[in-house]
Image: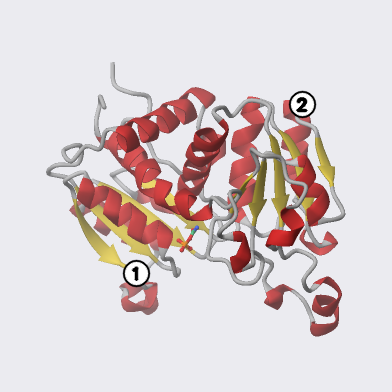
Amino acid sequence: MPNPLYRQNVISVADLSTGQLELLLHTALKLKAAPRDDLLKGKLIGSCFFEPSTRTRLSFETAVQRLGGKVIGFADGANTSAKKGETLADTARIISSYTDAIIQRHPKDGAARVLAEFSDVPVINAGDGTNQHPSQTLLDLVTIYETQGTLNRLKIAMCGDLKYGRTVHSLAQALKRWGCEFAFVSPPSLAMPDYITEELDEAGCAYQVLPTLEAAVEWADILYMTRVQRERFDEQEFAKIQGRFNLDAAMLAHAKNNLRILHPLPRVDEIHPDVDATPYAYYFQQATNGVYARQAILSLILNEEV
Ligand code: CP
């Protein structure tokens, strides 16, 4: 029987069953423990980045090449015929006629689903606007499992830009399946959107808003930091919140031993470099896990059996 992800698109965490997420998680852990170099032999993958990226693009391309596949693509949509007005539908028709799967990052919410509608090969969403970033979620799940030994009933604190941060939306939608509890720390204007908190209510997951990062540090098993972008505020408003969502090593004095700090990266000021040397920092290992998570996605959508 083919695996349930064979020839499937990976567009949104909400589309994936808990069983599919567990299959992806355990495949990533298996590929990390016992690397393979043959699972994409003879496959050509389109890597289409209409928006800047360091980790997602390079870890996908590393994943393909280490599994024996080849990559074509672009890192800047400004050098493509999209600049001349070509539609995403036509782009999908053309690139899917060349490749076995397409990875796309795009600034518009919903762009991955549009591409998938007109593509003859599976599409992987590598981030669409403020919407979803499912491969980031998988690497986050791999990292959380690796550091905590379970995904069940963990205390997850999320801090920073919870309104526009696609990584925290996808991650909350995944972790609600394992009965996790959530705490949110953000400026009020960047609070977690209602559609996510409504999903947590429906899943029976408790959540609270905490006033400070220190309170989150004491409470959490995982502290998931994100970047608050200055351009979301006018100068006066930014002055009021400046520094309130930045973490430094002194603020970790009351952390539980098992606390691990994650961040999708890039970071700017929200994690001081003095946190890097503490036993709680795990964001660089998290980024490394991106290769195994993305290998799991690619090998499952392109092989009946892995
Ligand atoms: N985490 C993440 O998506 O990083 P990049 O924007 O560098 O790909």
Q: Give the CA separation, mark 2 to mark 1.
A: 41 Å
Crowding near pointer 2: few (<14 within 10 Å), some, many (20+)? some
Q: Residue furthest bottom?
A: 235
From the top left corner, tell me how far across and down residue 98 is, in percent: 19, 54
Would you say residue 111 is visible in this rendering?
no
Along the line of sight, which residue is nearer the eye, 93 or 159?
159
Quarter in which the N terminus is drawn: top left
Which quarter of the figure has residue 256?
top right
Secondary structure beneath disc 2? loop
| Image position, residue 152 (x, y; %) | 63, 25
Identify the colour scheme used: secondary structure
**Residue marked by disc 2:** 204
Few, some or many C-alpha atoms within 10 Å of disc 1 (few <14, some 14-19, many ≥20)?
A: some
Which one is nearer the viewer's eye here, 219 or 201? Answer: 219
Identify the residue shown where x is 70% and y is 63%. 248
- Going 25% across and 58% down the picture, which residue do you hit? 94
**Residue 75 shows which numbered tag?**
1
Q: Amino acid at mark 1?
A: Ala
Placement of 72 over or under 21, stated as above or below: below
Q: Position of residue 262 (x, y in %)?
A: 58, 51
Q: Identify residue type, mark 2.
A: Gly
